[in-house]
Protein backbone atom coordinates (compact mmCIF):
# COMPACT_ATOMS: atom_id res chain seq x y z
CA UNK A 1 0.00 0.00 0.00
CA UNK A 2 1.29 3.47 -0.89
CA UNK A 3 0.43 6.59 1.13
CA UNK A 4 0.66 9.95 -0.66
CA UNK A 5 -0.01 13.23 1.14
CA UNK A 6 -0.88 16.69 -0.16
CA UNK A 7 -3.98 18.77 0.58
CA UNK A 8 -7.03 18.49 -1.63
CA UNK A 9 -8.18 15.06 -2.80
CA UNK A 10 -8.58 11.78 -0.96
CA UNK A 11 -9.67 8.33 -2.03
CA UNK A 12 -8.88 4.66 -2.33
CA UNK A 13 -7.37 3.33 -5.52
CA UNK A 14 -6.62 -0.12 -6.88
CA UNK A 15 -5.13 -2.75 -4.58
CA UNK A 16 -5.84 -0.63 -1.52
CA UNK A 17 -3.72 2.36 -2.59
CA UNK A 18 -4.61 5.31 -0.37
CA UNK A 19 -3.93 8.85 -1.55
CA UNK A 20 -4.57 12.43 -0.54
CA UNK A 21 -3.81 15.51 -2.59
CA UNK A 22 -3.75 16.91 -6.13
CA UNK A 23 -3.39 14.23 -8.77
CA UNK A 24 -3.47 14.21 -12.56
CA UNK A 25 -3.80 11.40 -15.07
CA UNK A 26 -2.25 11.22 -18.53
CA UNK A 27 -3.90 9.69 -21.62
CA UNK A 28 -2.90 6.21 -20.46
CA UNK A 29 -4.40 6.80 -17.00
CA UNK A 30 -1.04 6.88 -15.24
CA UNK A 31 -1.18 8.96 -12.07
CA UNK A 32 1.20 11.94 -11.81
CA UNK A 33 2.19 13.21 -8.36
CA UNK A 34 2.63 16.90 -7.62
CA UNK A 35 6.12 18.26 -7.00
CA UNK A 36 7.16 17.77 -3.39
CA UNK A 37 4.79 14.87 -2.74
CA UNK A 38 6.32 12.09 -0.67
CA UNK A 39 5.52 8.42 -1.07
CA UNK A 40 6.14 5.55 1.30
CA UNK A 41 5.48 1.86 0.81
CA UNK A 42 3.38 0.53 3.66
CA UNK A 43 3.49 -3.01 2.34
CA UNK A 44 6.09 -4.81 4.30
CA UNK A 45 5.16 -7.75 6.51
CA UNK A 46 8.38 -9.65 6.96
CA UNK A 47 8.69 -13.22 8.24
CA UNK A 48 11.60 -15.18 9.70
CA UNK A 49 11.49 -18.98 9.84
CA UNK A 50 13.78 -21.39 11.69
CA UNK A 51 17.21 -20.52 13.06
CA UNK A 52 19.24 -21.55 16.09
CA UNK A 53 20.34 -20.04 19.42
CA UNK A 54 23.69 -21.86 19.78
CA UNK A 55 25.62 -24.75 18.24
CA UNK A 56 22.93 -27.32 19.10
CA UNK A 57 19.58 -25.61 19.91
CA UNK A 58 17.42 -25.04 16.83
CA UNK A 59 13.97 -23.56 16.26
CA UNK A 60 11.06 -24.32 13.97
CA UNK A 61 9.07 -21.19 14.83
CA UNK A 62 8.04 -18.41 12.43
CA UNK A 63 7.98 -14.79 13.64
CA UNK A 64 6.93 -11.61 11.85
CA UNK A 65 7.33 -7.83 11.93
CA UNK A 66 6.34 -4.71 9.99
CA UNK A 67 9.41 -3.58 8.05
CA UNK A 68 8.34 0.08 7.85
CA UNK A 69 7.96 0.43 11.63
CA UNK A 70 10.32 -0.52 14.45
CA UNK A 71 9.76 -2.94 17.32
CA UNK A 72 10.11 -6.55 18.40
CA UNK A 73 8.99 -9.64 16.51
CA UNK A 74 5.63 -11.41 17.05
CA UNK A 75 4.91 -15.14 16.81
CA UNK A 76 3.33 -16.31 13.53
CA UNK A 77 3.37 -20.13 13.63
CA UNK A 78 5.72 -23.09 13.08
CA UNK A 79 7.53 -24.82 10.21
CA UNK A 80 6.69 -28.48 9.52
CA UNK A 81 10.06 -30.10 10.36
CA UNK A 82 13.35 -29.49 12.21
CA UNK A 83 16.79 -28.79 10.68
CA UNK A 84 15.73 -25.33 9.47
CA UNK A 85 18.90 -23.37 10.28
CA UNK A 86 21.13 -21.78 7.60
CA UNK A 87 18.29 -20.99 5.21
CA UNK A 88 16.96 -18.04 3.21
CA UNK A 89 13.30 -17.51 2.43
CA UNK A 90 11.71 -16.84 -0.96
CA UNK A 91 8.18 -15.96 -1.96
CA UNK A 92 5.78 -13.48 -3.52
CA UNK A 93 3.52 -10.67 -2.34
CA UNK A 94 1.21 -13.27 -0.80
CA UNK A 95 3.29 -16.39 -0.07
CA UNK A 96 6.42 -17.03 2.06
CA UNK A 97 8.46 -20.16 1.28
CA UNK A 98 11.40 -21.79 3.08
CA UNK A 99 13.46 -24.33 1.06
CA UNK A 100 15.75 -26.83 2.79
CA UNK A 101 17.96 -26.13 5.80
CA UNK A 102 20.20 -27.92 8.26
CA UNK A 103 20.89 -28.30 11.94
CA UNK A 104 23.14 -25.63 13.53
CA UNK A 105 26.36 -27.59 12.89
CA UNK A 106 25.37 -28.34 9.28
CA UNK A 107 25.76 -32.08 9.71
CA UNK A 108 22.08 -32.95 9.27
CA UNK A 109 20.08 -31.40 6.43
CA UNK A 110 16.56 -31.51 4.99
CA UNK A 111 15.06 -31.21 1.51
CA UNK A 112 11.64 -30.09 2.76
CA UNK A 113 10.08 -26.90 1.36
CA UNK A 114 7.42 -25.20 3.53
CA UNK A 115 5.10 -22.27 2.82
CA UNK A 116 2.60 -19.96 4.51
CA UNK A 117 0.20 -17.26 3.38
CA UNK A 118 1.88 -14.04 4.55
CA UNK A 119 -1.31 -12.24 5.57
CA UNK A 120 -2.60 -15.12 7.74
CA UNK A 121 -0.81 -16.26 10.89
CA UNK A 122 -0.57 -20.02 11.39
CA UNK A 123 1.61 -23.06 10.80
CA UNK A 124 3.40 -23.85 7.55
CA UNK A 125 2.25 -26.39 4.95
CA UNK A 126 4.42 -28.72 2.86
CA UNK A 127 5.27 -27.29 -0.58
CA UNK A 128 7.57 -29.98 -2.03
CA UNK A 129 11.26 -30.96 -2.00
CA UNK A 130 14.46 -29.13 -2.91
CA UNK A 131 16.70 -30.32 -5.73
CA UNK A 132 19.42 -31.38 -3.28
CA UNK A 133 19.34 -31.94 0.48
CA UNK A 134 21.29 -29.01 1.89
CA UNK A 135 21.40 -25.91 4.04
CA UNK A 136 23.51 -22.76 3.65
CA UNK A 137 21.85 -21.90 0.33
CA UNK A 138 21.42 -18.37 -1.04
CA UNK A 139 17.87 -17.70 -2.24
CA UNK A 140 15.86 -15.01 -4.04
CA UNK A 141 12.57 -14.75 -5.91
CA UNK A 142 10.29 -12.58 -7.99
CA UNK A 143 6.49 -12.90 -8.16
CA UNK A 144 6.63 -16.22 -9.98
CA UNK A 145 9.99 -17.98 -9.57
CA UNK A 146 12.10 -18.76 -6.49
CA UNK A 147 15.77 -19.73 -6.85
CA UNK A 148 18.26 -21.37 -4.44
CA UNK A 149 22.00 -21.49 -5.12
CA UNK A 150 24.90 -23.37 -3.56
CA UNK A 151 24.69 -25.09 -0.19
CA UNK A 152 26.29 -27.56 2.21
CA UNK A 153 27.27 -29.78 4.11
CA UNK A 154 29.52 -30.30 1.07
CA UNK A 155 29.93 -27.13 -1.00
CA UNK A 156 27.87 -27.36 -4.17
CA UNK A 157 27.41 -25.28 -7.32
CA UNK A 158 23.82 -26.43 -7.92
CA UNK A 159 21.11 -23.85 -8.66
CA UNK A 160 17.48 -24.96 -8.36
CA UNK A 161 14.14 -23.22 -8.82
CA UNK A 162 10.46 -23.49 -7.96
CA UNK A 163 7.33 -21.84 -9.30
CA UNK A 164 6.15 -19.77 -6.34
CA UNK A 165 2.44 -20.06 -7.09
CA UNK A 166 2.44 -23.86 -7.57
CA UNK A 167 3.39 -26.45 -4.98
CA UNK A 168 5.82 -29.11 -6.15
CA UNK A 169 9.47 -30.15 -6.21
CA UNK A 170 12.34 -27.90 -7.29
CA UNK A 171 13.80 -28.17 -10.80
CA UNK A 172 17.36 -27.76 -12.10
CA UNK A 173 18.28 -24.19 -13.12
CA UNK A 174 22.05 -24.34 -13.76
CA UNK A 175 25.38 -24.02 -11.91
CA UNK A 176 27.31 -21.33 -10.03
CA UNK A 177 30.77 -20.35 -11.33
CA UNK A 178 32.25 -22.13 -8.31
CA UNK A 179 30.84 -24.40 -5.60
CA UNK A 180 30.09 -22.56 -2.36
CA UNK A 181 27.86 -22.34 0.69
CA UNK A 182 26.67 -19.38 2.73
CA UNK A 183 26.45 -16.82 -0.07
CA UNK A 184 24.65 -13.54 0.55
CA UNK A 185 21.65 -12.74 -1.62
CA UNK A 186 20.56 -9.59 -3.47
CA UNK A 187 18.24 -9.13 -6.41
CA UNK A 188 15.46 -7.53 -8.37
CA UNK A 189 12.39 -8.94 -10.13
CA UNK A 190 14.69 -9.91 -13.04
CA UNK A 191 18.14 -10.64 -11.55
CA UNK A 192 19.56 -12.66 -8.63
CA UNK A 193 23.06 -11.91 -7.29
CA UNK A 194 24.92 -14.40 -5.08
CA UNK A 195 27.60 -12.54 -3.08
CA UNK A 196 30.59 -14.22 -1.47
CA UNK A 197 30.34 -17.54 0.33
CA UNK A 198 32.60 -20.32 1.58
CA UNK A 199 34.46 -22.42 -0.98
CA UNK A 200 35.99 -23.85 1.56
CA UNK A 201 37.61 -20.49 2.30
CA UNK A 202 35.75 -17.19 2.31
CA UNK A 203 35.40 -15.77 -1.22
CA UNK A 204 34.64 -12.25 -2.47
CA UNK A 205 33.27 -13.44 -5.84
CA UNK A 206 29.74 -12.40 -6.87
CA UNK A 207 27.71 -14.34 -9.47
CA UNK A 208 24.37 -13.49 -11.06
CA UNK A 209 21.58 -15.17 -13.01
CA UNK A 210 18.59 -13.87 -14.93
CA UNK A 211 15.60 -15.25 -13.02
CA UNK A 212 13.40 -15.95 -16.02
CA UNK A 213 16.11 -17.82 -17.98
CA UNK A 214 17.57 -21.13 -16.80
CA UNK A 215 21.32 -21.53 -17.26
CA UNK A 216 24.66 -21.16 -15.52
CA UNK A 217 25.63 -18.13 -13.44
CA UNK A 218 27.88 -15.34 -14.76
CA UNK A 219 30.56 -13.40 -12.89
CA UNK A 220 29.22 -10.08 -11.53
CA UNK A 221 32.24 -8.60 -9.72
CA UNK A 222 33.87 -8.69 -6.29
CA UNK A 223 33.00 -7.61 -2.77
CA UNK A 224 34.97 -4.66 -1.39
CA UNK A 225 37.31 -6.51 0.95
CA UNK A 226 38.53 -10.03 1.52
CA UNK A 227 35.92 -12.74 1.07
CA UNK A 228 33.02 -13.18 3.45
CA UNK A 229 30.29 -15.76 4.01
CA UNK A 230 27.01 -15.99 5.93
CA UNK A 231 26.24 -12.32 5.22
CA UNK A 232 22.82 -10.70 5.28
CA UNK A 233 21.51 -9.33 1.98
CA UNK A 234 18.66 -7.00 1.01
CA UNK A 235 17.52 -5.12 -2.08
CA UNK A 236 15.24 -2.35 -3.26
CA UNK A 237 15.04 -3.77 -6.76
CA UNK A 238 17.58 -1.16 -7.88
CA UNK A 239 20.28 -1.36 -5.20
CA UNK A 240 21.51 -4.50 -3.48
CA UNK A 241 23.13 -4.39 -0.02
CA UNK A 242 25.30 -6.98 1.77
CA UNK A 243 26.00 -6.60 5.50
CA UNK A 244 27.73 -8.48 8.29
CA UNK A 245 28.97 -12.03 7.89
CA UNK A 246 32.24 -13.77 8.59
CA UNK A 247 35.68 -13.26 7.03
CA UNK A 248 36.22 -15.66 9.07
CA UNK A 249 35.92 -13.08 11.91
CA UNK A 250 32.43 -11.61 12.32
CA UNK A 251 32.13 -8.14 10.76
CA UNK A 252 29.72 -5.18 10.78
CA UNK A 253 30.58 -3.61 7.42
CA UNK A 254 27.90 -2.89 4.79
CA UNK A 255 28.48 -2.87 1.01
CA UNK A 256 26.24 -2.18 -1.99
CA UNK A 257 25.91 -2.69 -5.74
CA UNK A 258 23.65 -1.38 -8.50
CA UNK A 259 21.78 -4.55 -9.45
CA UNK A 260 21.25 -3.85 -13.16
CA UNK A 261 24.99 -3.23 -13.70
CA UNK A 262 27.99 -5.48 -13.14
CA UNK A 263 31.10 -4.51 -11.19
CA UNK A 264 32.60 -4.45 -7.73
CA UNK A 265 30.75 -3.50 -4.55
CA UNK A 266 31.21 -0.13 -2.81
CA UNK A 267 31.21 0.86 0.88
CA UNK A 268 27.79 1.70 2.37
CA UNK A 269 28.42 2.05 6.13
CA UNK A 270 28.42 -0.11 9.27
CA UNK A 271 25.84 -2.06 11.25
CA UNK A 272 25.31 -1.06 14.89
CA UNK A 273 27.11 -4.19 16.05
CA UNK A 274 28.91 -7.15 14.54
CA UNK A 275 26.29 -9.48 12.99
CA UNK A 276 27.53 -12.77 11.59
CA UNK A 277 24.92 -15.19 10.23
CA UNK A 278 22.10 -12.64 10.53
CA UNK A 279 18.69 -13.08 8.95
CA UNK A 280 17.43 -10.39 6.57
CA UNK A 281 14.17 -8.83 5.38
CA UNK A 282 13.48 -5.96 3.02
CA UNK A 283 10.97 -3.93 1.07
CA UNK A 284 11.67 -1.28 -1.57
CA UNK A 285 12.73 1.22 1.09
CA UNK A 286 14.30 -0.53 4.06
CA UNK A 287 16.47 -3.55 4.90
CA UNK A 288 16.38 -5.26 8.32
CA UNK A 289 19.27 -7.40 9.65
CA UNK A 290 18.29 -9.60 12.58
CA UNK A 291 20.11 -11.77 15.10
CA UNK A 292 23.69 -13.03 14.92
CA UNK A 293 26.00 -15.73 16.18
CA UNK A 294 29.05 -14.83 18.24
CA UNK A 295 30.51 -18.03 19.59
CA UNK A 296 29.22 -19.60 21.81
CA UNK A 297 25.76 -18.02 21.64
CA UNK A 298 23.31 -15.92 19.61
CA UNK A 299 22.21 -12.30 19.95
CA UNK A 300 18.78 -10.72 19.44
CA UNK A 301 19.79 -7.35 17.91
CA UNK A 302 17.86 -6.10 14.86
CA UNK A 303 19.30 -3.24 12.77
CA UNK A 304 17.85 -1.44 9.76
CA UNK A 305 19.03 0.75 6.91
CA UNK A 306 17.36 2.91 4.29
CA UNK A 307 18.54 1.17 1.13
CA UNK A 308 18.72 4.29 -1.05
CA UNK A 309 20.85 6.23 1.47
CA UNK A 310 24.37 5.16 2.43
CA UNK A 311 25.12 5.29 6.16
CA UNK A 312 25.20 3.24 9.32
CA UNK A 313 22.52 0.87 10.64
CA UNK A 314 19.98 1.95 13.27
CA UNK A 315 18.22 0.04 16.04
CA UNK A 316 15.00 -1.70 14.96
CA UNK A 317 14.12 -3.84 18.00
CA UNK A 318 14.73 -7.41 19.18
CA UNK A 319 14.06 -10.78 17.63
CA UNK A 320 12.52 -13.30 20.03
CA UNK A 321 13.77 -15.81 20.78
CA UNK A 322 17.40 -14.76 20.29
CA UNK A 323 18.66 -16.63 17.21
CA UNK A 324 20.79 -16.64 14.06
CA UNK A 325 20.78 -18.13 10.53
CA UNK A 326 17.00 -17.97 10.09
CA UNK A 327 15.32 -17.56 6.73
CA UNK A 328 13.73 -14.20 6.01
CA UNK A 329 11.28 -13.09 3.31
CA UNK A 330 8.53 -10.50 2.93
CA UNK A 331 5.59 -9.44 0.79
CA UNK A 332 7.71 -6.77 -0.93
CA UNK A 333 11.32 -7.99 -1.04
CA UNK A 334 13.75 -7.22 -3.83
CA UNK A 335 11.54 -4.64 -5.48
CA UNK A 336 8.37 -6.77 -5.61
CA UNK A 337 6.33 -3.71 -4.60
CA UNK A 338 7.70 -1.59 -7.45
Image: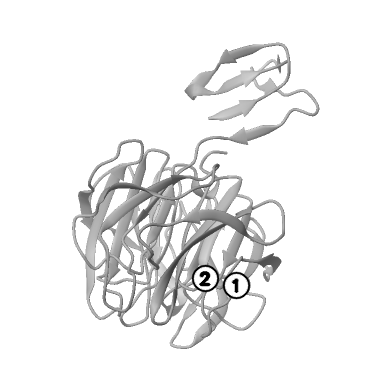
Q: Residue at x 42, y 39 (%)?
A: 93
Residue 75 higher or lower than 252, as above or below: above
Q: Quadrant of residue 7?
A: top right
Q: Quadrant of residue 268?
A: bottom right
Q: Are marks 1 and 2 in contact (CB under 8 Å)?
A: yes
Q: Which x, y percent locates residue 237?
A: 59, 49
Residue 289 higher or lower than 121, as above or below: below
Q: Nearer the viewer, residue 274 or 169?
A: 274
Residue 25 seen in render: no
Residue 45 higher or lower than 28, as above or below: below
Q: Quadrant of residue 277?
A: bottom left
Residue 249 relative to residue 223: left or right: left
Q: Which x, y percent locates residue 244?
A: 55, 71
Q: Which x, y percent locates residue 187?
A: 54, 56
Q: Nearer the viewer, residue 192 or 113?
A: 113
Residue 297 higher or lower than 272, as above or below: below
Disc 1 designates what residue? 252
**Label for residue 8?**
none
On-image quarter of the C terminus = top right
Disc 2 designates what residue? 275
Q: Nearer the viewer, residue 206 or 54?
A: 54
Q: Which x, y percent locates residue 236?
A: 59, 49
> Helix or strand or loop: what does disc 1 sit on?
loop
Q: Residues within 10 Å of mark 1 (few under 14, many from 20)?
A: some
Q: Residue at x 53, y 79 (%)?
A: 250
Q: Residues within 10 Å of mark 2 (few under 14, many from 20)?
A: many
Q: Residue at x 72, y 11 (%)?
A: 8
Residue 63 relative to residue 241: left or right: left
Residue 22 relative to residue 85: left or right: right
Looking at the image, tell me whether mark 1 or mark 2 is earlier in sequence order. Answer: 1
Amino acid sequence: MTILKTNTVSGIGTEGTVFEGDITFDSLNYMTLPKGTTAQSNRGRGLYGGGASDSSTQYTDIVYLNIQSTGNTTQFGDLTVTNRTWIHGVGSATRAIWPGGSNPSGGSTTNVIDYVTIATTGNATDFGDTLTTSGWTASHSNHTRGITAGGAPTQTNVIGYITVTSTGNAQDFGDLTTARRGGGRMGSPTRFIIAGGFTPTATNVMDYVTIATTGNATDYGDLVTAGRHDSGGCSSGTRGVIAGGETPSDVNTIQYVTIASTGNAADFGDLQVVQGACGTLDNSIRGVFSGSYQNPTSHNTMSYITIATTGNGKDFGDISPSKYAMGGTSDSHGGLSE
